[in-house]
Image: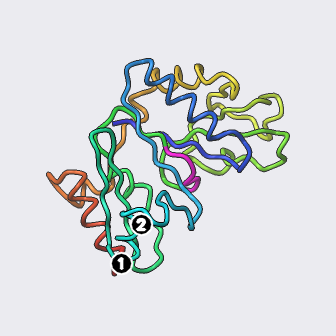
């Protein structure tokens, strides 16, 4: 499984780029999953629905499934922030995991940067940034040997990923702690820590 993050400030175009990269990787025959960092108050459930009522009644987890999709909603007993590695451990096996947000995570990532927004570039100080996707390469604040990709050409980002697959191969930090254990076991042990 390969994992790549997409980091950048709000309004830089991360979501649009990720959406287009998903489509490009799928056209290349790849199975793609996404991990997205959200605002603390986000919800995918709706008042009055059975699953919402079960959560209101105090369920720790609610799993809703049909022959088309599955959703799992977990209520933390106390506020906590799962790491990106814990969230990746929750996923089924796939070819690529695209991570949006988690800009300070210890994952290889592509920085999405627009000069017009006036924000500083992360690649200058972050060794995990492997490439920069930008609409203004001539305005990058510091010279770099990292690949500079065209933000408006998602196909070039997909090509970069497919030609550098080995570099993005993911090794879970849980694999050392759980010899022979699968992702599910790692996720179970890590979420036990979140409940403490």
Q: Residue at x 30, y 58 (%)?
A: 63
Figure quadrant of residue 37: bottom right
Q: Residue at x 56, y 67 (%)?
A: 40
The answer to if 28 sits in the magenta stretch is no
Q: Residue at x 58, y 53 (%)?
A: 103
Q: Which mark is residue 188?
A: none
For residue 29, side relative to residue 14 (left or right)? left
Residue toward you, 17 or 106: 17
Task: Please state the extent of the stretch shown in magenta in the rendering.
Answer: 99-104
Percent x, y of residue 124: 69, 46
The quadrant of the picture occupied by the N terminus is: top left
Q: Residue at x 58, y 19 (%)?
A: 155
Classified by dominant secondary structure, the portion drawn in magenta counts as loop
Percent x, y of residue 125: 66, 51
Distance of mark 1 from mark 2, alpha carbons? 9 Å
Q: Which mark is residue 52?
A: 2
Mark 2 lies on a secondary structure that is: helix
Which residue is tagged 1?
A: 57
């Amino acid at each position: 499984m390969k994992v790549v993050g997409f980091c950048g400030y709000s309004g830089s175009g991360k979501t649009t780029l990720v959406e287009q990269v998903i489509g490009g990787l799928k056209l290349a025959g790849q199975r793609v999953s996404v991990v997205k960092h959200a605002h603390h108050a986000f919800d995918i459930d709706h008042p009055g629905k059975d699953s919402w009522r079960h959560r209101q009644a105090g369920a720790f987890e609610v799993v809703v499934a049909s022959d088309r999709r599955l959703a799992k909603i977990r209520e933390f007993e106390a506020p906590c922030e799962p790491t990106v590695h814990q969230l990746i451990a929750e996923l089924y096996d796939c070819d690529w995991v695209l991570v949006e947000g988690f800009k300070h995570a210890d994952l290889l990532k592509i920085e999405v940067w627009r000069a017009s927004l006036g924000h500083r570039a992360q690649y200058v100080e972050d060794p995990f940034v492997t490439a920069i996707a930008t609409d203004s390469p001539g305005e990058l604040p510091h010279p770099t040997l990292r690949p500079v990709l065209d933000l408006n050409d998602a196909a070039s980002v997909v090509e970069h990923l497919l030609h550098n697959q080995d570099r993005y191969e993911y090794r879970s930090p849980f694999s050392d702690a759980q010899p022979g254990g699968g992702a599910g076991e790692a996720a179970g042990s890590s979420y036990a820590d979140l409940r403490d």
